[in-house]
């Protein structure tokens, strides 16, 4: 019987060595990080969300930070919705935007290059002589760069009691905003309970 270790002497052994598993893993990890859902309406914690800070008796600074799958308009809507919640939560009826901004933060994730190789070896024996041959071929696969944009919206609001002034375009009725915006804010139901 012929031992498996003797097979190399009489035949051909094709061995394939691949080193691309790490690159594939890194690419999958980057895609998973970026392919998560858009940021739902939520308080900022480990993930993105809203935060607010009281500045004085009727002034607050409110912000909303989202991931790369949340568009600019959604981030701005979440910010206004949170401003309305803060206003009502502090016992006021309407708020005035005294300042506001939406910042676009750009970034990129790069995956590493990978190398894949194939080694072919053969051996032949005849009498007291043995001949062998081995060749290695390799391919370099360049990494990828994936760009993204994340939005951060912030505002400073002054809160007041009573009816909002009809001639101030920066004034918002917090009661109406909650009523009209709640159905379109993902996660708003749990926030308002």
Image (cartoon, rainbow, N blue to C red):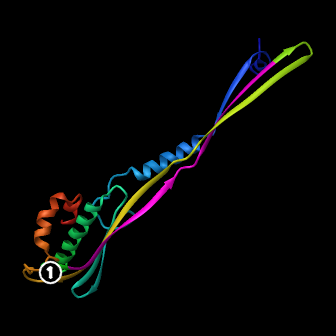
Residue occupying the point 59% across, 46% down:
113
Horizontal side, residue 81 vs residue 33: left or right: left
Left or right for 130, reference 54? right
- Residue lying furthest right in this view? 128
Q: Quadrant of residue 191?
A: bottom left
Point 14% across, 73% down: residue: 174
Residue 91 to residue 139: above or below: below
The picture places residue 136, in percent across and down from the top left corner, at: 72, 32
- Of all residues, the one furthest to the bottom in this rendering is 57
* SS at circle 1: loop
83 vs 67, left or right, is left
Whether 78 is among the magenta residues is no
Residue 112 visible in rendering: yes
Residues rendered magenta in the picture = 97-123
Q: How many marks?
A: 1
The answer to which image quadrant residue 181 occupies is bottom left
Place of residue 41 in the rendered image (x, y in percent of width and height, measured from the top left): 27, 62
Q: Position of residue 44 (x, y in %)?
A: 34, 67
Specify whether residue 106 is painted magenta.
Answer: yes
The answer to which of 190 and 158 lies nearer the viewer is 158
| Mark 1 burial class by Cα count in 10 Å: few <14, some 14-19, many 20+ | many
Residue under label 1, please give it: 92
Quadrant that contains the C terminus? bottom left
Residue drawn at point x = 18 percent, y = 58 percent: 184
- Residue 54 lies, in percent from the top left, at 28, 82
Secondary structure mostly seen in the magenta stretch: strand
């Amino acid at each position: 019987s012929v031992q498996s270790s003797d097979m190399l002497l009489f035949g051909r052994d094709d061995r394939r060595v691949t080193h691309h598993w790490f690159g594939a893993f890194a690419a999958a990890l980057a895609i998973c990080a970026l392919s998560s859902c858009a940021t739902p309406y939520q308080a900022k914690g480990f993930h993105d969300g809203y935060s607010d800070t009281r500045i004085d008796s009727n002034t607050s600074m409110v912000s909303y930070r989202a991931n790369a799958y949340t568009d600019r308009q959604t981030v701005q809507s979440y910010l206004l919705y949170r401003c309305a919640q803060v206003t009502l939560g502090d016992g006021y009826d309407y708020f005035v935007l005294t300042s506001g901004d939406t910042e676009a933060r750009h970034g990129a994730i790069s995956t590493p290059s990978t190398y894949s190789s194939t080694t072919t070896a053969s051996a032949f024996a005849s009498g007291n002589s043995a001949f062998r041959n081995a060749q290695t071929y390799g391919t370099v696969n360049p990494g990828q760069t994936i760009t993204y944009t994340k939005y951060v919206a912030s505002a400073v609001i002054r809160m007041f009691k009573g009816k909002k002034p009809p001639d101030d375009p920066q004034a918002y009725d917090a009661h109406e905003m909650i009523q009209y915006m709640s159905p379109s804010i993902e996660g708003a139901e749990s926030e308002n309970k």
